[in-house]
Amino acid sequence: MKNMLTTRKIFLIVFFSLQIAGILVGRFTKTKFFCWAPYDEISFYDIDVTVDGVELGKDEITDRYRKPGYGRENRSIHNLISIIRQYETTYGKEDNAIVELSFITNGHSEKIWIWPEDKIIP
């Protein structure tokens, strides 16, 4: 019986410690993968991609990243940037792609993220 209580206490301590760690990670990172609170960012975006000088259509962009070429991102826009960055540094690293992601978050001014420079322009 006493051993069962000790095991239960250890489990609860570990469980709540992981919850607190997830909250802290989510608080201080851009991607917010571990946040279990409601997302407080809504972004409208448009992706333009040029591969070896040829501009891709929206359907080709959707096939490339498995995300629509334009639309609404209910999570942090950095989740979408992470998806594009991951693709371009692995599968698409030989494609000489130029990606321009324009987005508006929470009704603020438009910003543009550019690959391969990997920077956001206000």
Image: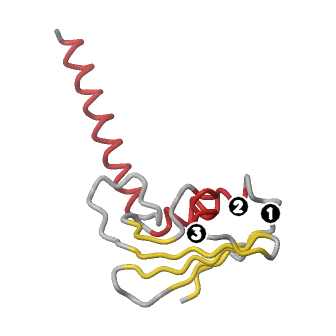
Residue 31 visible to the viewer? yes
Residue 118 visible to the viewer? no
Label 2: state its secondary structure.
helix
Nearest the eye: 6 or 80: 80
Q: Amino acid at mark 1?
A: Asp
Q: Amino acid at mark 2?
A: Glu
- Whether the residues at callouts 2 and 3 have beta carbons within 8 Å, the answer is no
- Whether the residues at callouts 2 and 1 have beta carbons within 8 Å, the answer is yes
Nearest the eye: 117 or 73: 73
Nearest the eye: 111 or 49: 49
| Residue under the image location 53 percent in, 89 percent down | 122
Q: In the picture provided, is 15 more to the left or to the right than 88? A: left
Q: Quadrant of residue 109?
A: bottom left
Label 1: state its secondary structure.
loop
**Which of marks 3 and 2 precedes in the sequence?**
3
Q: CA distance from mark 2 to mark 3?
A: 17 Å
**Which of marks 1 and 2 precedes in the sequence?**
2
Residue 84, horizontal then vertical, whole percent: 61, 63
Q: Quadrant of residue 27?
A: bottom left
Disc 3 designates what residue? 58
| Residue under the image location 42 percent in, 59 percent down | 32
Residue 50, horizontal then vertical, whole percent: 72, 74
* Number of marks in the rendered image: 3
Q: Which mark is residue 88?
A: 2
Disc 1 designates what residue? 95
**In the picture shown, does residue 84 fall above or below 48?**
above
Q: CA distance from mark 2 to mark 1?
A: 8 Å
| Residue under the image location 29 percent in, 27 percent down | 10
Front position among marks 2 and 1? 1
Q: Amino acid at mark 3?
A: Lys
